[in-house]
Image (spheres, rainbow, N blue to C red):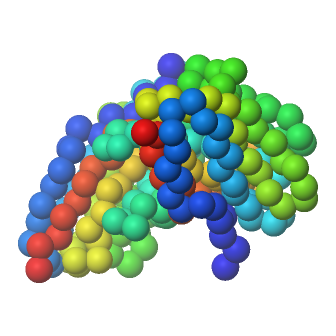
């Protein structure tokens, strides 16, 4: 079974603080893929990153960074020097080798306070 | 940049009525998907579609639901007889291939309200 858990329902930070959003996944597939999407107040789902199970290198893109650790089945997302525009719901998702559907976590609602 | 579009952005209907939600996937993509998100909950997979056939569907996608690609650009989700619990945001997505590795690009969603 595929499952994604985002234990943090809501997080509030003050602008310029760093914040980490947690994602823990479960899968029996040896090959799988992890994704992060951003859902701003306007409602659309914006793709942020994809990571495959064989690549445990951390990735940095501007103020965003991702820490993938297979040993703990986690794929955490850090925003450095948060900005008000980062306020959104962030979803972690998993796809496995047994199909093409995505399994989403319940999302973390991030509020950045100016 | 190519994007997935969806119409309408908001649909209000009476219980028992039929609704059709429309999507235009990214033009060179071959796989199409519908997901739904009940307010405040996670995004859930409904169905995937390739080569004019359903390739995968979830338990949610029962006989009340159907999908169709009526022409070369549109991809539709039909709910035959809406129920109150069908109220949700419906997202269309598309991908280049149907591989698990492939990123799915989502449209802006259609908010369906069933009264």
Left or right placement of residue B82 versus residue A25 in this view? right
Residue drawn at (26%, 68%), measured in percent from left and top?
A: A87
Residue drawn at (66%, 70%), measured in percent from left and top?
A: B3
Classify A104 as above or below A98.
Answer: below
The image quadrant that residue A16 belongs to is: bottom left
**Residue A96 in view of the camera:** no
Q: Nearer the viewer, residue A67 or A15?
A: A15
Classify A78 as above or below A9.
Answer: below
Q: Position of residue A96 (x, y in %)?
A: 60, 33
Q: Position of residue A111 (x, y in %)?
A: 18, 64
Classify A90 as above or below B37.
Answer: below
Q: Nearer the viewer, residue A5 or B59?
A: B59
Residue drawn at (78%, 31%), measured in percent from left and top?
A: B55
Left or right placement of residue A6 versus residue A42 in this view? left
Q: Nearer the viewer, residue A58 or A8?
A: A8
Q: Quadrant of the N terminus of chain B?
A: bottom right
Left or right placement of residue A93 versus residue A23 in this view? right
Residue drawn at (46%, 40%), measured in percent from left and top?
A: B114
Q: Position of residue A90 (x, y in %)?
A: 35, 55
Classify A70 as above or below A77.
Answer: above
Q: How many marks?
A: 0
Left or right placement of residue B95 versus residue A107 in this view? right
Q: Quadrant of the C terminus of chain B?
A: top left
Q: Position of residue B92 (x, y in %)?
A: 63, 51
The image quadrant that residue B9 belongs to is: bottom right
The image quadrant that residue A36 belongs to is: bottom left
**Residue B75 in view of the camera:** yes
């Amino acid at each position: 079974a595929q499952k994604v858990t985002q234990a943090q329902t809501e997080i509030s930070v003050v602008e310029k603080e760093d914040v980490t959003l947690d994602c823990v996944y479960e899968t029996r597939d040896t090959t799988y893929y992890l994704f992060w999407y951003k859902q701003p107040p306007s409602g659309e789902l914006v793709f942020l990153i994809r990571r495959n199970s064989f690549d445990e290198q951390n990735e940095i893109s501007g103020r965003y960074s991702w820490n993938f650790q297979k040993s703990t089945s986690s794929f955490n997302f850090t925003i450095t020097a948060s900005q008000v525009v980062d306020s959104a719901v962030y979803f972690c998702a998993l796809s496995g080798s047994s199909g093409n559907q995505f399994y989403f976590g319940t999302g973390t609602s991030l509020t950045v306070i100016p | 940049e190519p994007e997935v579009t969806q119409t309408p952005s908001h649909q209000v209907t009476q219980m028992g009525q039929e609704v059709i939600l429309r999507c235009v996937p990214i033009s060179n993509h071959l796989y199409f998907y519908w997901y739904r998100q009940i307010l405040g909950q996670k995004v859930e997979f409904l169905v995937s579609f390739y080569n004019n056939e359903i390739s995968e569907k979830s338990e949610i996608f029962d006989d009340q639901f159907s999908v169709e690609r009526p022409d070369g650009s549109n991809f539709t989700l039909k709910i035959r007889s809406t129920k109150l619990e069908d109220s949700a945001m419906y997202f269309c997505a598309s991908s280049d291939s149907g591989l698990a590795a492939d990123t799915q690009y989502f449209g802006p969603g259609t908010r369906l309200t069933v009264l």
